[in-house]
Each structure stands twice: as C-alpha cells, then as structure tokens.
Amino acid sequence: MRTLLILMGFLMAQTAFAQESGTTCDNEPSCVTDLANVVGAMSNGSMPFLANAAATAAQRMDQVHDQLLEERGYGVYYGNKISDSSEWPEAVPQDCTTFVLEILRQAYKAAGLESDWHNIFGQAVASSGSSGFKGIELMKSLQKAGWSGHYWNPDVKNPRDNGNEHPWSYYLAKKNDSYYGLPVDMDKAIINYNLTEVDEAHSSPGLDALKDVPFGVLAAKGGMHMAVIVNGEVYEVHWSTSATSTEVITAEPLEDWGWLSGAIVVPPGTWPDSGGGS
C-alpha cells in the first residue's frame, strides 16, 4: 500500500518545470498543454489523437531532458534508484512505470479525457492490490477502455538468452489468447522478426504493422518491466541512471531491444486492419 501511495503522490505532485530557454510550456516537462496544437491536424477522433499525443509526450520528455542537461549540467529526470539527488534540486525521479503513467496522463489531458484517465488509473490501482502497482493491471484497465492487446516475441522457438520464459509464454499465448491474464489477439501478433539463427533481417507482418502504430504501452516478463513504443521504437527509463546522463530515457527499435517477449496494448483504431502474424 505504501508503494501505491507514493506512486499516486508522484502523479499528483509532479514537479513543475520551466525550460531555461524561455518557453515554460505551462510548466509541463514535455509541453503537454500545446500538444493539442501540435497533434490536432494529425488524425481524426479522440483515440488516434490520443495515440499521437502520447507519442509526442514520450519524445518530448526525452528531448527536453537532453536539452536541459546540455544547458545546465543535469536534465529533467533521474532514475529513482539513485539514493542521493541533492545535486539536481529540480530533477524529477522516474522509473519504468512512472514514465508510462506520466505519458498517459499527459496524453489523456491533451485529448480532453482526464476523467477517463482517472478511471483507468483507479481501476489499475484497485486491481493491483496491496502488494504494489502492476503494469499488467494497467494494461488490462486500458483494454477495458477499448485498447487492443498484442503479443510480441522476436524468436518464439530459440530465444537469444536461451530462457524458457519466451517459448513458454508463446505457447500459453497461442493456447489461451492471453499473456499473464491479459487478452491478446494472436492473429495480430508481432513474432519471429529477429530470429536467433538467421543473420539477415526477417520479414514480419506483425512488426511491419506495429511500425505504423503511433503509440503503445509495452510490458515484458509479465509486467516486470514497462516501456512505451512509438512507431516500432521502444522508449524506456533506466532507474539507476543519474540526471547527468542522456541515458535516463533511451529509444531503440523493438527488433534490437534486449527484452525478448511480452505484450503491447494500443489505442483503438490505431492497429492496421491487415497487419499481424509471423
């Protein structure tokens, strides 16, 4: 319960931040309040708009951190496993989960759907129970709001780390159409796009489709790690990284990402109709 209270307190009391370059962006770290102007012409409907707003928020959180790091010697964020942050008085602690939650909060705000976000987050907190907030429960809550679930695994038979987790999770996903209790559409899975024993790139309709999706929330190992994905590129926070590093938030293509299986949920109306499978 203490973990949940800390998490909720973080979201309610997010440190106000003004860029030293002169643009305050209404004191939002990623300039969320002008997202409507930036994203408004990109798509029609609240859900595609939401996806583009979330993608923009993720990219800006990364960009503004690096910008402030260059200007003043430390950025906006640091990993919350750092025990002493006294040298970065205005920096905000983040981990993989709070990063995802902050992006979603900003996107729903930009889309004018703040009450929807409060309901989604509240359901996730309640279903997580007293043992701590669970990323899979957040994804289930998003599904109740219409988001679709998809399984991903670069090599369903021969994972690069030789771990049993990955072929086993694929077997269960195929059998039950679910990943750790999260429903997934296995007809639109993202699989076999980086085969261990094949040197050249391997075509994957699922990965090709994912690259056309503006935004998704991603989990690995049952929610042990969380990230977001923007047109096939994974944005994540590293919780042991200082505010003086550009590596607090990183981005890399899913096909190069070190985590080797999991699930993604994407807003309704954003997954291509014909995309999926191996």
Image (cartoon, rainbow, N blue to C red):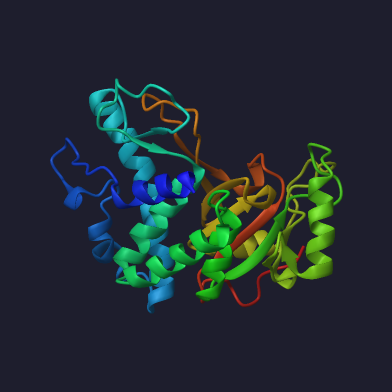
Tell me if residue 256 comes above or below residue 212 in the rendering.
Answer: above
Tell me if residue 89 comes above or below residue 229 in the rendering.
Answer: above
Tell me if residue 24 comes above or below residue 265 in the rendering.
Answer: above
Q: Estimate the x, y position of residue 184 in percent, counting from the top left.
A: 69, 68
| Drawn side of residue 64 relative to residue 1, left or right | left
Q: Estimate the x, y position of residue 223 in percent, counting from the top left.
A: 62, 51
Q: Quadrant of residue 90?
A: top left
Whether residue 276 is visible here, answered yes or no, is: yes
Of 120 and 63, the residue lying toward us:
120
Tell me if residue 210 comes above or below residue 144 in the rendering.
Answer: above
Q: Name the residue at 38% across, 21% down.
A: 84
Q: Name the residue at 23% across, 27% down.
A: 71
Label tally: 0
Q: Quadrant of the C terminus?
A: bottom right
Q: Name the residue at 68% across, 53% down.
A: 262
Q: Name the residue at 57% across, 53% down.
A: 134
Q: Quadrant of residue 40?
A: bottom left
Q: Quadrant of residue 211?
A: bottom right
| Drawn side of residue 246 relative to residue 267, left or right | left
Of 96 and 255, the residue lying toward us:
96
Whether residue 211 is visible here, answered yes or no, is: no
Q: Estimate the x, y position of residue 165 in percent, counting from the top left.
A: 79, 47
Q: Estimate the x, y position of residue 33 in percent, counting from the top left.
A: 23, 59
| Drawn side of residue 83 relative to residue 272, left or right | left
